[in-house]
Amino acid sequence: MVEVLLEGLGKHAEEATIQNWFFEEGDSVNEGDELVELTTEDGSITINAPATGVLAEVYYDEGDVVAKGEVLCCIDDEEKEISGGAEE
C-alpha cells in the first residue's frame, strides 16, 4: 500500500480543504493521475497519484479540512493474480 500524504502546501499553509476527488474508492489509477484538488490560503493545489494501482481507501470527504502531513488516501499497488482456485 502506498500512502498519499498532504504535502507541498507552501511555506505558510498548515491545512487545506478538499475540493474534489477525481476518483472513487475501488477505481484504478495510474502514476501521475490527478487524485484530489485542494485549496489553501495560498491558492489551490492538485495531488497526483504516486503509484499505479487501485484507490483502496479515501480518508476524507470533499469539504473536509486536512492538516499538513496527514494521509489523504491509500493506493494498493500490489499486482494480484486472478486464480480460479484457493491458494494453499
Image: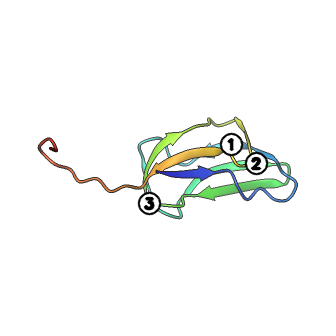
Q: Which mark is residue 86?
A: none
Amino acid at the residue labelled 1: Ile
Percent from the top left, x then y, of residue 79?
32, 56
Which mark sits nearer the N-terminus, 3 or 2?
A: 2
**Mark 2, residues whose alpha carbon is within 10 Å: few (<14), some, or many (≥20)?**
some
Find out whether the residues at labels 2 and 1 contact each other: C-beta distance under 8 Å: no
Numbered circles on residues, count: 3
Colour scheme of the rendered structure: rainbow
Q: Is residue 63 left or right of residue 77?
A: right
In the picture, residue 12 is in which quadrant? bottom right
Which mark sits nearer the N-terminus, 2 or 1?
A: 1
Q: Which residue is mark 1?
A: 18
Q: Residue at x 85, y 49 (%)?
A: 41
Which mark sits nearer the N-terminus, 1 or 3?
A: 1
Q: Which residue is mark 2?
A: 39
Looking at the image, which is closer to me, 34 or 68?
68
Q: Residue furthest left?
A: 85
Q: Which residue is mark 3?
A: 52
Amino acid at the residue labelled 3: Thr
Amino acid at the residue labelled 2: Thr
Percent from the top left, x then y, of residue 86?
14, 41
Callout 3: SS = loop
**Mark 3, residues whose alpha carbon is within 10 Å: few (<14), some, or many (≥20)?**
some
Q: Residue at x 67, y 44 (%)?
A: 70
Percent from the top left, x then y, of residue 82?
20, 50
Q: How far is the residue under mark 2 from the one under mark 1?
A: 7 Å
Find out whether the residues at labels 3 and 2 contact each other: C-beta distance under 8 Å: no
Q: Residue at x 53, y 60 (%)?
A: 33
Percent from the top left, x then y, of residue 7?
70, 55
Q: Is residue 73 left or right of residue 39?
A: left
Q: How far is the residue under mark 1 from the one under mark 3?
A: 22 Å
